[in-house]
Image (spheres, rainbow, N blue to C red):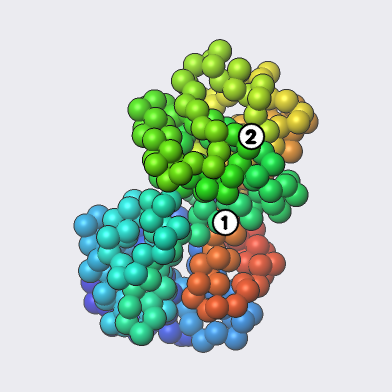
Amino acid sequence: MNWNAVAGRFTPPARLAVIGDPIGHSRSPQMHNPALQASGIDAQYIRVQVPVGSVAQAFRQFAACGFLGVNITIPHKFEALDAVDVLDPLARQLGAVNTLAIREGKLHGYNSDGPGFLRSVKEAFGTDIQDLRVLIIGAGGGAGRAVAVQSALSGCRQLMLVNRSHEKAEAVAAEIFLLGRRAETSVIPWRDDALRAALAKTDLIVNATSLGMRPNDVRLLPADALLQRHLVFDMVYRADGRTPLLADAAAAGARTVDGLSLLLHQGAISFEHWFGRPAPLEVMREGLQNAVKA
Ligand SMILES: NC(=O)c1ccc[n+]([C@@H]2O[C@H](COP(=O)([O-])OP(=O)(O)OC[C@H]3O[C@@H](n4cnc5c(N)ncnc54)[C@H](OP(=O)(O)O)[C@@H]3O)[C@@H](O)[C@H]2O)c1
């Protein structure tokens, strides 16, 4: 890639980016560019496709081209852990870096997914995670692990982990134990009876699997086990805002939030790392909503 061309062909100049592989689908530019403009920052946020194995090299190139920061998405969040000079302790605990801030040539790695999740829960449901019994489905994936560890670190009342590959959820529970768990943690088998029993003692249900993105995906949970008192957080989002899980939850009278909220709040926290000031949240929200509708 011609890096100087990447950085130089934009007006305002490209100073921020999201990397992934693939990356064409990312809505982050439509969220961050209006925020930069509203904040009077002369910089543009772009998408850059980076192949697996090239994250460290890409970070050095961004620094050499005068970039201020980068967001990191699938599949690079783990590779990025080893590609920074200074790793934030929370990113180390959550096991992934999704935000790079470049300061005086040094690469600082953060995770804004975990704290973004907490803000989303608070905004959507008016509740702190400390008050909730949390069931995370897909706890063995990258996003699920981050949300599980964040919930435990923040002292949720109870944590139940489920994953199709059961041993991955067990590994996350073991990591949480080693971190000095502040929440009672258990691993639930992915079986109808076990899920029903867990749902009966759950306040917040989190879908951290990729199920629900495609129209023919199988149902994540038995619809008749969803209750009006459940809070349902689907990390997946769709243009119509109604994933199958959220549609079932709404039919049961439960309160819901989709993955757009997490995308917004993690983006706002990245902005705060880059510029040391609050992000223009409503401008970012509008940018995202417009991008999803388009
Ligand atoms: N809204 C946001 O800002 C945001 C941020 C991060 C992630 N996400 C979303 O969260 C989801 C997971 O992302 P990730 O980065 O964690 O991906 P990942 O590391 O690849 O993990 C995928 C997870 O989904 C499970 N899964 C995949 N197909 C399944 C199936 N057919 N049946 C049951 N479980 C299945 C996997 O289970 P196994 O371990 O058994 O394979 C694993 O737990 C994606 O939909 C992503 O778009 C959203």
User: Badge 2 local density, few (<14 within 10 Å), some, or many (20+)?
Assistant: many
Report if residue 288 is visible in the image.
yes
Pinpoint residue 1: horizontal percent, then vertical percent: 23, 72
The amino acid type, in three-letter code, at marker 2 is: Arg
Which residue does the numbered mark 2 point to in the structure image? 133
**Which quadrant of the view contains residue 177?**
top left
Is there a contact, CB below 8 Å, between mark 1 and mark 2?
no
Pinpoint residue 9: horizontal percent, then vertical percent: 37, 83
**Which quadrant of the view contains residue 102?**
bottom left
Quadrant in which the C terminus appears? bottom right
Vertical relation: 101 (above or below) 158: below
Vertical relation: 71 (above or below) 127: below
* Viewer-proximal residue among 147 and 72: 147
Q: Is residue 60 left or right of residue 86?
A: left
* Viewer-proximal residue among 286 and 86: 86
Q: Is residue 82 left or right of residue 142?
A: left
**SS of the residue at dot 2?**
strand
* Viewer-proximal residue among 165 and 154: 154
Report if residue 204 is visible in the image.
no
Mark 1–mark 2 Cα distance, whole angstroms, equals: 19 Å
Which residue does the numbered mark 1 point to in the structure image? 116
Q: Residue at x 51, y 86 (%)?
A: 42
The amino acid type, in three-letter code, at marker 1 is: Gly
User: Badge 1 local density, few (<14 within 10 Å), some, or many (20+)?
Assistant: many
* Mark 1: C-beta under 8 Å from nearest atom of ligand 1: yes
